[in-house]
């Protein structure tokens, strides 16, 4: 793609060769894009907004978290014809999936809810990246939950 943006819904929107050969793509699975509660960093929001999307259309705020919005059909706002329409610019959590952190936030693991988790591995690099993402998401949430941030949101 040479740095160019893919047209949503086009074959290029699904990303590089590695993504097309992932267990999910090979099986036509997009289960992780259904009923998603994918958290977003502020950087994710800014990157997606720079594509021309209005944040209020693609995100919801819940208890200090920013999350991808689901459509009325219960699917990710960006899922189109079984493909991610913003694949090259997708959120960091989507990039790392199916590697997630356990409930205690101490161990990286493959999400057992992913039907194809057995086809993935967790590298030390990816585990470290997911850990850093989890810490960043918590820090950003705490900043949004601070009394000062709440007053600014109300104005």
Image (cartoon, grey):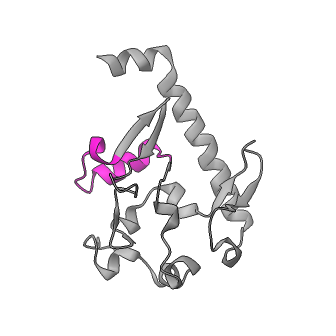
Q: Residue at x 22, y 54 (%)?
A: 52
Q: Residue at x 28, y 41 (%)?
A: 56
Report the front residue among 139 and 37: 37
Majority secondary structure of magenta residues: helix
Residue 71 visible in the current orientation: yes
Is 129 in front, or is 33? 33
80 horizontally vs 108: left or right: left
Quadrant where the N terminus is found in the figure? bottom left
Q: Is residue 26 above or below residue 97?
A: below
Point out residue 34 in the picture as x, y percentages from the top left corner.
Answer: 46, 59
Front residue of this view, candidates 30 and 6:
30
Q: Residue at x 44, y 80 (%)?
A: 16
Quadrant of image for the C terminus: top left
**Does residue 102 appear to the left or right of 53 in the view shown?**
right
Could you tell me which residue is drawn at 55 percent across and 27 percent down?
Answer: 142
Horizontal arrangement in the rendering, residue 101 relative to residue 49 (left or right): right
Q: Is residue 116 above or below residue 112?
A: below
Q: Residue 78 lies in magenta, yes or no? A: no
Find the magenta span and give its range.
39-58
In which image quadrant can residue 103 be found?
Answer: top right
Residue 118 falls in image quadrant: bottom right
Does the magenta-highlighted stretch encompass residue 56? yes
For the residue pair 69 and 88, the one nearer the viewer reads as 69
Whether residue 1 appears in this view of the structure is no
Residue 6: image location, x then y, percent: 29, 73
């Amino acid at each position: 793609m040479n740095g160019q943006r893919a047209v949503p819904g086009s074959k290029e929107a699904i990303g590089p060769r590695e993504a097309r050969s992932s267990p999910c793509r090979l099986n036509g699975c997009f289960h992780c894009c259904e009923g998603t509660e994918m958290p977003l960093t502020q950087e994710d929001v800014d990157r997606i907004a720079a594509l021309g999307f209005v944040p209020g259309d693609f995100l919801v705020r819940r208890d200090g978290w920013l999350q991808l919005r689901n459509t009325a059909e219960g699917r990710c706002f960006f899922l189109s014809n079984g493909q991610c329409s913003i694949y090259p610019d997708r959120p960091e959590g989507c990039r790392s999936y199916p590697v997630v952190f356990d409930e205690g936030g101490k161990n990286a693991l493959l999400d057992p809810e992913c039907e194809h988790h057995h086809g993935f591995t967790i590298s030390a690099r990816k585990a470290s990246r997911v850990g850093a993402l989890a810490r960043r998401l918590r820090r950003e949430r705490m900043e949004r939950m601070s009394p000062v941030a709440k007053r600014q949101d109300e104005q």
